[in-house]
Image (cartoon, rainbow, N blue to C red):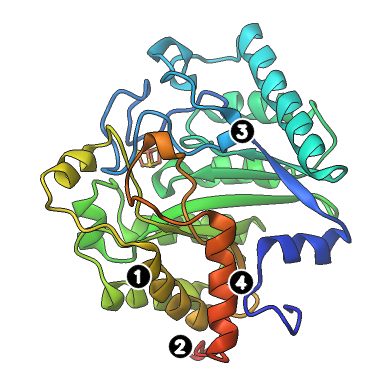
Amino acid sequence: MQQAREPFFSYANYLKQKYGQAAYRISVDAGFSCPNRGPDRSEPGCLYCDEHGARAPYQGYRDAVSGQRVIGSVQSLPQEWRLDLRNQIDSGRRFISSRYGAGLYILYFQAFSGTYAPVETLREIYDFALGCAPFRELAVSTRPDCIDRSKAQLLSSYRSEDFEVWVELGLQSANDESLNRINRGHTVSDFETAFNICRALGLKLTVHLIFGLPGEGIPEILRTIAYVAALKPEAVKIHNLHIPKGCPLYAEYLSGELNVPCADRHLQYTLQALERLPPETVIMRLTCDTPEHLLAAPKRFEQKARFLSRVREEMKFRNTWQGRLYSSAG
Ligand code: SF4
């Protein structure tokens, strides 16, 4: 359970409770693409997706990976890719230890869809990366239409009593109309099928959500939260809608057709969501992290740490907390 003075159950707190010390994710780009971007990352995909896919800022924002450098085009991991993966892990460890000192490490396949390859290729990639450092957990971010029973079974095979495997599944919205509008390429039902497969195999689940999608306001967001709360995922990641320059939504933004939530509006969405999520669901994230130079909107959104402080302050001021309006009876 969360500590008495924390209005929501943050990921940092969860990790400290679990390990008795800080643990940090090392985020890697293994060269995956995603079914929505095609095997070489050349299709437009979700309307808010730019050429980089999601990644940790310390990984840098290299030029878009070319068609020859994505996993979809190979059956086995070439030697130079292994070196690249090892370099990413080594530099992630250096960055974390110089910034935070000692800690435990979690291997995180973050960019694009970390299960978008044949099972045997995935096994090769996961085995190799896990052998590069003494990781305490494995986390893989993917899409509902990119994980089936055989891939989930592979991920589950890495589990042990003291080694957890997390799957981060993008839902974004529980409204099919919105998923269609943003070209997600899957339905809510696809998400639920993938969620249930992973859960049945003992994988921990993080659900990704975006607040402020085109056509969505509080009613739609609360419907999504009610749907997610009923599933009781182990964790959620909440993102405010970001428009990176060059993504398909950028043109709509430039034409003035798009209304992107500012920090104050996202704060209101966030508070209402937190009150309705189960108290034991870990809150892994509350904002996006797109670097300034890539971001078209929202402009002047405050830093992540400042936003988190505001959420805490506002919840204390309102005398509310995560789960205050959650009902396990639905
Ligand atoms: S699922 Fe992720 S990587 Fe694929 S198109 Fe959507 S945002 Fe981009």
**Foreground tag (4 vs 1):** 1
Marks 4/3: CA distance? 27 Å
Q: Is residue 159 visible?
A: no
Residue 281: give its label.
4
Three-letter amino acid code of the residue under disc 4: Thr
Residue 265: give its label.
1
Query: Where ligand 1 lies, by image quadrant?
Result: top left
Q: Is residue 249 left or right of residue 237?
A: left
Residue 58: give its label.
3
Residue position for label 2: 330
Sequence order check, earlier mark of 2 and 4: 4
Under tag 2, what secondary structure?
Answer: loop
Under tag 3, what secondary structure?
Answer: helix
Which of the pair 53/151 is nearer the observer?
53
Under tag 4, what secondary structure?
Answer: loop
Under tag 1, what secondary structure?
Answer: helix
**Foreground tag (3 vs 2):** 3
Three-letter amino acid code of the residue under disc 1: Arg
Marks 1/3: CA distance? 28 Å
Marks 4/1: CA distance? 23 Å
Q: Are marks 1 and 2 in contact (CB under 8 Å)?
A: no
Residue at image position (85%, 42%) is 101
Pointer 4 local density, CA inside 10 Å: few below 14, some 14–19, many at least 20: many
Q: Check the image and report above or below for 310 versus 250.
A: below
Q: Is residue 61 left or right of residue 109?
A: left
Q: Is residue 145 visible?
A: yes
Q: Position of residue 4 (x, y in %)?
A: 75, 85
